[in-house]
Amino acid sequence: MLIAIEASVIFGLLAGLLVATLGASPLAAVCAGGATIAACFGIAMGAATYVTKQSN
């Protein structure tokens, strides 16, 4: 689970920086980063749940 949190934060920060670098407003950059964190965390936890169910 820790890897899911770490990956989500890293991808969220990168997405926010990318949007800010492309010239968007700071609010749009924060929103993009937050949405990326939520999406990555959901995908990673879904994958972890799937793998756990397969190993049982």
Image (tube, rainbow, N blue to C red):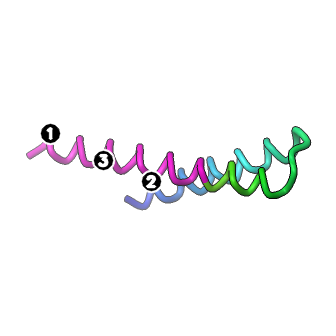
Task: Give percent across and percent down for residue 7.
Answer: 53, 51
N-terminal-most mark, 3 or 2:
2
Which residue is at a point 69% across and 48% down the rendered structure image?
32
User: Mark 3 Cα within 10 Å, few/some/many (few <14, many 20+)?
Assistant: some
Does residue 53 show up magenta in the picture? yes
Amino acid on which the number 1 mark rests in the picture:
Gln
In the image: residue 34, left or right of residue 29: left
Q: Say which element carries label 1.
A: helix
For the residue pair 11 and 38, the one nearer the viewer reads as 38
Does the CB distance between marks 3 and 2 fall below 8 Å? yes
The residue carrying mark 1 is 54
Q: Magenta span covers which residues?
A: 35-56
N-terminal-most mark, 1 or 3:
3
Q: Say which element carries label 3.
A: helix
Q: Say which element carries label 2.
A: helix
For the residue pair 41 and 52, the one nearer the viewer reads as 41
N-terminal-most mark, 2 or 1:
2
Amino acid on which the number 3 mark rests in the picture:
Ala
The alpha-carbon separation of the residues under discs 2 and 1 comes to 18 Å
The alpha-carbon separation of the residues under discs 1 and 3 comes to 10 Å
The residue carrying mark 3 is 48
Which residue is at a point 91% across and 42% down the rendered structure image?
23
Amino acid on which the number 2 mark rests in the picture:
Ala
